[in-house]
Image: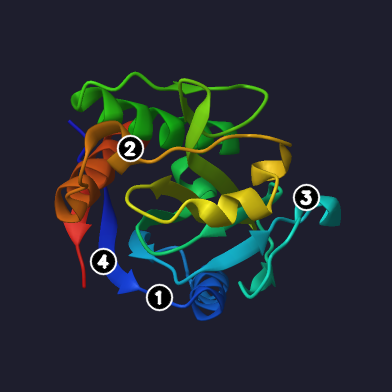
Amino acid sequence: MTTPTPLLLRHKGLCEYTPTFQAMQTFSQSRNSDTLDELWLLQHPPVFTLGLNARPEHLLTPGDIPVVQTDRGGQVTYHGPGQLVAYLLLDLRRRRLGVRQVVSAMEQSVIALLAEHGVSAEARAEAPGVYVRGRKIAALGLRVKNGRSYHGLSLNLDMDLEPFRRINPCGYTGLEVTQWRDLLGPADLAHIETRLAGHLARQLGYRLEHGD
């Protein structure tokens, strides 16, 4: 029986967006064939991020919240405290994983996590992410370069949702968002991190190892 490939889990806490973005790029560019794949769990201070194909008209009234251009796929989204972000730094070529497989694994991991707590959620083929009764609770965006992925998913837990009204989330006019607190009450961050990491590892065929 083959031992699952290790996935190094790092809990990073509250991290400024731009240095984290740069750290993902550096990690992906400098890794070699022996470098373990990593899963980073963290939160960001308030920031709007634009994907490579983001249209400026979807950024409505950013106000005093910073706007950062990124190299991920997708349109515009918002990150802020109370939102769990999971970045997947994977060697897809080594694992023979396709982008669609990774996207599906992220969606199914969030769906399984919510199902454990009695919430039915779904993915949409035409609009990647996870939705509960038509409202988006998790957004996805990846970058793959030289067969290596970074960026990942964001899951709304217990946050101020007002900034989402300053954009067309993920490029969809009028798209409503929701969060864990409004569906299930207070969010236990440590529990959710543990369960989400476990689902991601299983969906992608990894064995979790704990880093810092």
Q: In the image, 21: left or right of 127?
A: left
Asked if labels 4 and 1 touch by Cβ distance under 8 angstroms, the answer is: no
Are the residues flagged by discs 2 and 3 in contact, CB closer than 8 Å? no
Between the C-alphas of marks 2 and 1, the distance is 25 Å
Q: To which residue does mark 2 refer?
A: 182
- Quadrant into which the N terminus falls: top left
Q: Label for residue 11?
A: 4
Quadrant including the C terminus: bottom left
Q: For the residues labelled 4 and 2, say whether their Cβ atoms are less than 8 Å apart.
A: no
In this view of the protein, can residue 33 be seen by the observer? yes
Q: x, y (%) of residue 18?
A: 56, 77
Residue 168 appears left or right of 45:
right
Tell me the number on the disc at residue 15: 1
Q: Which mark is residue 58?
A: 3
Q: Earlier in the sequence, mark 4 or mark 2?
A: 4
Marks 4 and 3, the one that precedes in the sequence:
4
